[in-house]
Image (spheres, rainbow, N blue to C red):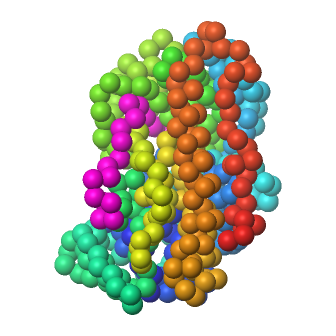
Amino acid sequence: MILIIGAGLGGLVTAISLARARLPVTVYEAASALTETGAGLTLGRGAQHVFRDLGLQADVAALACPAGSLPFLHYKTARLLMGTPDAGDGTPDDGGTDIVRHIYRGDLQAVMLAHAARLSIPVHTGKRLTGFEQDSASVTAHFADGSSAAGRLIVGADGIRSAVRALLHSGDAPRFTGHVAFRFLVPAALAAPFMGQGRSAIFIGPKRTFNRYTMQGGKVVNCAGLAETGEEVPEGWSLSSSIAEVGAAFPNWHPDATGLIAQAHSVIKWGLYDRKPLARWSEGRITLLGDAAHAMLPFLGMGAAMAIEDGWALARSLALEPDLAAALARYEAARHSRCETMQTMSRRQGEMTQAMDPDTLAPSAVPMANQDLMGFNPVRAGV
């Protein structure tokens, strides 16, 4: 039995991949219920290669929007700094084209949970990990409710504040980066007066960015404002904010940005944290993936995609290599360099974007994501 700690996107992809390879797996989630959390996220092409391999791509694409051109605009005037306006309507396609897509996290989670149920994968909630012990034959996880579970391997897929990582590396805490993010959703009908620059755009201002794009077939606009702050803000999806607080962080911005802010019904905020890279993700019968292994900032929108790729690669390695140590070495060889590079690029992208002066910025100076990295195909990566 393989024990997965965490029922987020990375944990669910890992479980589905293992079950399809006919490897026994059980998922343990600390939360008392699997509730819909989060907002919009980006599905890089690598993540979608995984979905195609697992037979999920059509279901995922039906709920996603093509990402479009995502132009950079001046925060006050909406002057085009780089890219081209996005005139698309956000209509989903069949998922066959090799493009980046946007999706609501809750929709993606629902697709994965439904597929896990069809595969009869046990998913237990209310299981907060408190410890583990391992020997040459097995590993045992202990939970706060007094229960335990034994298996061949523990997979820490439990996010940036991973209990598994904390037990492996005491004192290795997430680091606050001095940025806060605000997220909210606006129904398309209410957002329509403020979408004159196209369905996707990033407004660039001093130490601020405001990103918005459509989801759910163009029915909803996902908004994310990122700002530097001198006040440390907790990380997580449960910290509420307000229209007034977001408005104060983006004063005198273009009416398209402030208009969307005024239409926010429910705002969440969270501090942006990262973690130092680890030389190795595995110790004995314990391994890590996703944010637990390589938490990255959201400036490239690739955190979820990296967790999805990790989960597939780990399951593939375990299916190909009977020896556990060899399987984990194969997994890390396939993933470590790519994830560390993307982690570094995300941090640098944030530093450059937040430091821009849009009044003096030449269009050629705007940094953009490396599309070759975003288009990585894990299925062909020698895993």
| Residue 238 belongs to the span the image colors magenta | no
With respect to residue 137, does 290 lie above or below?
A: above
- Which quarter of the rendered picture does the N terminus lie within? bottom left
Which quadrant does the C terminus fall into? bottom right
Q: Nearer the viewer, residue 172 or 222?
A: 172
Q: Residue furthest top?
A: 359
The magenta segment is: 166-186
Q: Quick one: 241 or 383, which is closer to the camera?
A: 383
Counting from the top left corner in percent of width and height, residue 198 is at 69, 29
At x 40%, y 62%, the residue is: 158
* Left or right of 210 on screen, residue 158: left
User: Where, by quadrant of the figure, is residue 134 drawn?
Assistant: bottom left
| Quadrant assignment, res 146 | bottom left
Write the residue at 70% across / 41% down: 370
In the image, residue 176 lies in the stretch drawn in magenta: yes
Could you say which quadrant of the image residue 337 lies in?
Answer: bottom right
Taking the image as shown, residue 307 lies to the left or right of residue 101, namely left
Instruction: Please determine whether, in this image, residue 171 is positioned above or below residue 117.
Output: above
Residue at image coords 30%, 41%: 234
- On the image, the x and y values in percent for residue 29 come to 36, 68
User: Which percent across, then down, holds residue 26?
Assistant: 43, 80
Q: How many marks?
A: 0
Whether residue 272 is visible: yes
Residue 41 seen in the current view: no
Task: Indicate the position of residue 90 as horizontal and vertical percent values.
Answer: 70, 43
Q: Residue furthest bottom?
A: 137
Return the residue found at the far front: 279
Residue for point 42% across, 44% down:
274
